[in-house]
Image (tube, rainbow, N blue to C red):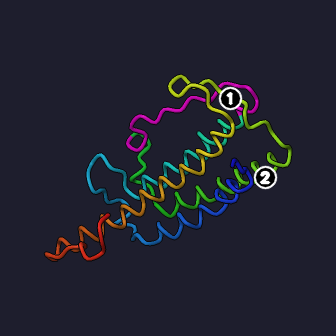
Amino acid sequence: MFDPAHLIHRLAHAPAAFRAMIECFPEAQSRWKPAPEHWSVTEIIAHVADEETEDFRPRLMATLAGALWPPLDLDRVAERRGYNQRNALGELARFEASRRESVAYLSALVASNPDWSIAHQHPKFGPIKAGDVLASWAAHDALHLRQLARRLHNLAEAGAGELGCSVRYAGEW
C-alpha cells in the first residue's frame, strides 16, 4: 500500500542511518575506493546530498506542477564535481540540512492531499508518477546505505588481507 506519511517518516530518519555509517570511516578511509570505477564513501554522500537538491525534491515539485523536469547530468558527476576531494562529514551535514528542508516541504505537501498519480513523461522510463518519485526517493537512500555497508565490508576485507587474514568467518557477503 502506498503510504506517503510512512515514506516521509523514512526520509526523515535516513540521515541518522547515513551518519551512523559515515562516522565508521576515518577521513582517510572515506576517500578509499575498492576499484577506480567504484565510489568512495565521500563520493556517495556528496552524491546523495546533490540528489536531494537537484533531483528528487525539484522533480517531485515539477511533476505535481505539470512542469518539465530540470535537467540532470550524472555522467561522471563525481569526477566533474570533485566529490572525492570534499570532506565526508561536511557533505553529510549538507545532506542533513537539505533533507530537513525536504521533509518540511513533504510534510506540508501531504497535508494538502496531492494527486500522487500525476505523471511526468520520462524519455527513458516512460510515465513517472509523483508517487513513483516519492517512493524512489526512499529507495534511493536504501541503495546508498547498502553501498556504504559494502564499503565497510570492503575495508574489513582489505585490512584483514594486509595481515594475511580473511573475513570468511563473518559469512558470505
Characterize the magenta stretch by its predominant secondary structure: loop
Nearer-the-camera pick, 1 or 135: 1
Q: Residue at x 56, y 25 (%)?
A: 126
Quadrant in which the C terminus is drawn: bottom left
Q: Dot 2, crowdedness within 10 Å: few (<14), some or many (≥20)?
A: some
How far across and how far down the image is residue 140, in percent?
53, 49
* Total tally of numbered discs in the picture: 2
How far across and how far down the image is residue 153, in percent?
33, 67
Q: Residue furthest left?
A: 164
Q: Is mark 1 on a helix, strand or loop?
A: strand
The reply to whether the C-beta atoms of the residues labelled 2 and 1 are less than 8 Å apart is no
Residue tagged by mark 1?
A: 119
How far across and how far down the image is residue 166, in percent?
20, 73
Q: Residue at x 86, y 44 (%)?
A: 112
Instruction: Give the foreground label among 2 and 1.
Output: 1
The amino acid beneath tag 2 is Ser
Q: Residue furthest right?
A: 112
Which mark, by number, is residue 107? 2
Q: Which residue is drawn at 56% across and 45% down?
A: 51
Left or right placement of residue 59 versus residue 115 in this view:
left
Q: Residue at x 30, y 71 (%)?
A: 171
Q: Give the range drawn in magenta.
A: 62-79
Nearer-the-camera pick, 53 or 81: 53
**Residue 84 within the segment the image draws in magenta:** no
The amino acid beneath tag 1 is Ala
**Is 8 drawn above or below residue 116 in the view shown?**
below
Left or right placement of residue 119 versus residue 39 in this view:
right
Left or right placement of residue 64 versus residue 74 in this view:
right
Image quarter of residue 127: top right
Q: Is mark 2 on a helix, strand or loop?
A: helix
How far across and how far down the image is residue 24, in percent?
43, 72
